[in-house]
Amino acid sequence: MRNLLLFSVLFLLAGCAAYTRYQLDQHYGLENPARFDHPAITATSVTYRHDVKPITDSRCAVCHGCFDAPCQLQMGSYEGITRGATKEKIYDDLRLFLMAPSRLFTDAQSNTEWRSKDFYPVLNERNPDTVANREAGVMARMLALKGRHSFPKSGLLPTERFDFSLYRTESCPAIEEFDQYADAHPEWGMPYGLPALSNKEQQTLQTWLEAGAPVEAARPLAKNQLDRVAQWEGFLNGASLKSQLMSRYIFEHWFLAHLYFDDLGEGEHEFFELVRSKTPPGRPIQLIATRRPFDDPHVPRVFYRLRPAQGSLLAKTHNPYALNAARMQRIKSWFIDEPYRVAQLPSYEPGIAANPFVAFEQLPVRSRYRLMLEEAQFTIMGFIKGPVCRGQVAINVINDYFWVGFLDPDHPIQESQKFLATTLKQLELPIGEENFTGLLKWRSYAREETNYLHAKSKLMNTVLVGNNLTNLSMLWDGDGNNPNAALTVFRNFDSASVVQGLVGEQPQTAMILGYPLLERIHYLLVAGFDVFGTVAHQLQARLYMDFLRMEGEFNVLALLPVEARNTVRDRWYRNAADEVYAHLDDSQALFFQQSGIVYKTD
């Protein structure tokens, strides 16, 4: 009986929506999804970039600016607004099957395409007249709804009327559902749960919407920016196999970066994204959109292109990376000038492409490490920001406060790092597993990681003896002038930040990372992490990161006196599960060499 009642209610609601859509069609004409693909230029006193975008940036984009935007409505760009919204959630703890990616500027190139992917408009796509623009657009109706109802001036908002929890049920009304939404939730106008826009802001947006949401042409890039783009695209698209493999490696580490040219002076900072294209420099970019940056591009030759970053810059997505002549020269010295040979380019077959120790084994280990190390703050921020926007998803496997140091790429210990990188060719990361059968391999992953740590400890016991005991000379000092030599990570539940230097008092824990560990973290949590993947994939990535975090902490313990290691370890892992202690005992007790540091305190 309950199922019949539920079906009846759903049928009734669907019928109401269909009737409302019919009425909208009669009053305002049929929808035209292509209307805003090439919007007409309308004479109006309000412009998008000068008047509207500052308002949406300050009042809308913080919530509606990333993958965690309610209803996937992204308001940090004109294209995000015209794309509209969808009822499908990206962050779904119960997702058992892969979700089709819905990355703005990537997975569809027109609003017509987005409509085929179940996105509906929030602007009026019917007749382009003032009344229709006001009455047949969700955005205009949401703003008007907010203006019609008073909002509490102080105090906490009542939880029975406003839900701000991360996994709340979202309300995503299309225009044909808006009347029912407004009747049921008259206080849920936009901005939701926040004070209304000022009268001036409200009038600006209303004028713009009633004029048909026009947009002016984008400002063209300055000649000096175009010149820099040409220089870097020329560098990244060399014909030699060395150059092609170098660029593939760079792309897989920079694909989320906001690149900029820091040698053009203040006020000249435009941000760019590195993308894969079917077309070479000098021709319009034909984007190669794949789920992950190492997936098969299905073209004979990939070209690496710089396109302007679009949309508002948000703290949860903005990870800047400076390009200049000195950096190009260093990269050239690491990857082009080094005396090594690339016999053939690696395959994009998943078992190869998903394992950087296999795909890039022909590139010098020191060169790979240097690329990540010299901008270590950017590299570490990658797995905190990375391909996710909801911080709790990104950082629930790190501590609240810890320091990070790095092994010196020029220390003799790096020879062992090369050995470890070779050993890791046999170690599988849980990147491609998207179903729950992958969870059955968990013991296999744990066993492989333990075997790797055994091999690492055996090597360390062989190498770090006599005059080569563990000591501070093993740590990178930033070559005397690079502030990325030491980092501090702060976490506050679902957000985190990385700052240069050892900041604050003695932290909860610390990590020391060498090339193999830094590379695995990047491919596990950045290049290989699929925010559109299944809960099984995401769970495995987070569980595996526990292994990598403990390995980094083990490297710190190796610098302590033998007699102090267990005491410090037990303090770090107090109240940990029994299996964690078993893993620690099994892997860490195998390194028994004394530290070469002379400690003067207890």
Image (cartoon, rainbow, N blue to C red):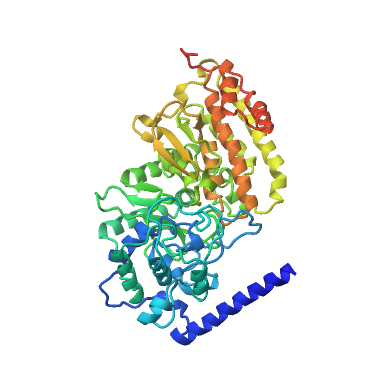
At a point 52% along the width and 36% down the height, the residue shown is 399
Between 431 and 72, the one nearer to me in the picture: 72
At a point 30% along the width and 48% down the height, the residue shown is 262
Between 387 and 493, the one nearer to me in the picture: 493
In x, y percent, where is residue 317? 43, 51
In x, y percent, where is residue 305? 41, 58
**Quarter occupied by the N terminus:** bottom right
In x, y percent, where is residue 210? 35, 76
Between 451 and 311, the one nearer to me in the picture: 311
At a point 34% along the width and 57% down the height, the residue shown is 230
Q: Vertical placement of 110 versus 425: above or below?
A: below
In this view, which residue lies farthest toward the right? Answer: 1
In x, y percent, where is residue 146? 41, 66
Can residue 493 be seen here? The reply is: yes
Using residue 9 as the reference point, say whether residue 364 is left or right of it: left
Q: Vertical placement of 210 versus 171: above or below?
A: below
Quadrant position of residue 580: top right
In this view, which residue lies farthest toward the top? Answer: 600
Q: Vertical placement of 127 versus 352: above or below?
A: below
In this view, which residue lies farthest toward the bottom? Answer: 26
Can residue 218 be seen here? The reply is: no
Between 499 and 326, the one nearer to me in the picture: 499
